[in-house]
Amino acid sequence: MGGTPPEDVSDSIRYQGKAVRDSSWIPEFLTDQETGVLGLVDGDTPHLVTQLFVYDGDEGAIFMHGAQAGRAHGLVADGDQPRATFTTSEKGRYIPAEEPVNFTVEYSSVVAYGTIGLLGDDERKRHILHQFMEKFAPQLTEGEDYEAMTDESVDRTAVYRLDVESWSGKRGWKDPERQGAYDLDSVSKSE
């Protein structure tokens, strides 16, 4: 994709009050998030996989990795740049309301759409895997805290590239002083 920003389709969100209008927010959010859910289609059945990921804004791509086996790998390897979706989110506090149907939760989320494929070049895969280490283990040093990636380990790892064609972002956060807002782990059930 190389430098062409994805189409922002946030205008198609049903509840426009939560649509993100800041064009820099979505890439920043993707860069900061750690896990997301990759959505693929297997015949007429959705297949969802939770993944660690790295977003590369220069390439307009989301990268994931895994074994060269399994259902997701088969769907991507057997397809010709199959369509895929990816979502990541962040949850905040719960917001009560007088009517239970109006209870809500604070959140931010992004949904991205595009095509997905596997990287074939081992040097490119190695570069992406190093990006994973920089993101998820920045305190560790290769060769000191963990062994350098061998050619064999890079070769046996599947690296997925989702080229983002479009995306949308939503945010729904309340005032920090919002009366009654709570974290679920801070409340206890009455006995």
Image (cartoon, rainbow, N blue to C red):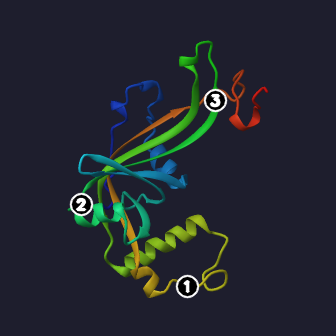
- Which of the labelled discs sits on residue 148, or is there none? 1
Residue at 48 percent across and 51 percent down: it is 36
Mark 2 is surrounded, within 10 Å at the Cα level, by few (under 14), some (14 to 19) or many (20 or more) other residues, namely some
Mark positioned earlier in the residue sequence (2 or 3)? 2
Query: Which residue is nearer to you in this view: 41 or 55?
Result: 41
What residue does disc 2 label?
A: 81
Real-space Cα distance between discs 2 and 3?
39 Å
Earlier-in-chain disc, 1 versus 3: 3
Mark 1 or mark 2, earlier in chain = 2
- Callout 1 secondary element: loop
Residue 163 appears at what percent x and percent y? 32, 57
Task: State the residue position of label 3.
Answer: 94
| Quarter-of-image position of residue 92 | top right
Q: Closer to us: mark 1 or mark 3?
A: 3
Q: CA distance from mark 1 to mark 3?
A: 44 Å
Residue drawn at (47%, 73%), measured in percent from left and top? 129
Residue 107 lies, in percent from the top left, at 55, 36
Mark 3 residue crowding within 10 angstroms, few (<14) / some (14–19) / many (20+): some
Question: Closest to the observer: 47 or 186?
Answer: 47
